[in-house]
Amino acid sequence: MFFLTSCATKGILETHILQGEPGEVDVIVFSSTDCPIANAMAPEIERIHISVQNAGGDLFLVHVWAGRTNIDAQKHADDYGLTMEVIIDTEHELVDSFNATVTPEAVVVLYDEDGTPKVIYQGLVNNLFDSPGNRRDEATQHYVRDAVAAGIKNEAISTSYRAPTGCIIEQKQ
């Protein structure tokens, strides 16, 4: 069981237990307010959020860099039109739990028969960026969307990990 803490949006501070109904899918996206690659992905992340929410799941945006406040996170959400819950993880509890290395990095979780979360995909949101500074006009592969769709249908995912491209998460010492 994973615990999500320090919800920053809508002025609420809560603790969330990452658990769900069998077959439900949740998405966690590690991000930062000042990573240009993560910010470029904001519209796609919002589209994924709406899709996951319509299927009965949740998408959590996790800010990972020290010094971020609830006000910073709310302003970022407002500036980029993000409506999902935002979590501030400056102590890297979630970063460490999922071994996240960059922003943006996505984790897709499917809940098994007893509601236990299982990671079915981790890595790139899509292929908008081949590498930092190497951006396509538009993404042609949508890895998180595909993983969510497969999870909802309880189908196998052909590739469960794709090395993410983005801003490096500096590890806590």
Image: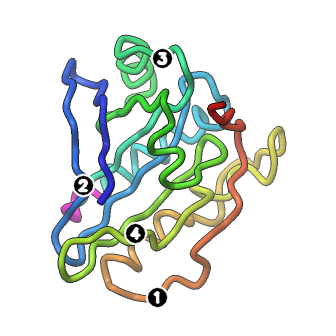
| Nearer to me, 96 or 35 | 96
Whole-number angstrom distance, CA of label 4 to CA of label 3: 29 Å
Q: Is 116 situated above or below 66?
A: below
- Colouring of the image: rainbow
Whole-number angstrom distance, CA of label 2 to CA of label 3: 26 Å
Element carrying mark 1 = loop
The type of residue carrying mark 3 is: Arg
The type of residue carrying mark 2 is: Gln
Element carrying mark 3 = loop
- At 41% across and 14% down in the image, what residue appears? 69
Please provide the residue range marked out in magenta.
52-56
Residue under circle 2?
53
Q: Nearer the viewer, mark 1 or mark 2?
A: 1
Whole-number angstrom distance, CA of label 4 to CA of label 2: 11 Å
Whole-number angstrom distance, CA of label 1 to CA of label 2: 21 Å
Q: Position of residue 53 (x, y in %)?
A: 24, 55
Q: Is residue 129 left or right of residue 139?
A: right
The type of residue carrying mark 1 is: Ala
Sequence-wise, the earlier of marks 1 and 3 is 3
Residue under circle 1?
156
Residue under circle 3?
68
Sequence-wise, the earlier of marks 2 and 3 is 2
Q: Nearer the viewer, mark 1 or mark 3?
A: 3
* 142 falls in the magenta region: no
Q: Is 168 situated above or below 116?
A: above
Q: Position of residue 100 (x, y in %)?
A: 59, 50
Q: Is 157 situated above or below 115?
A: below
Whole-number angstrom distance, CA of label 4 to CA of label 1: 11 Å
Sequence-wise, the earlier of marks 4 and 3 is 3
Residue under circle 4?
148
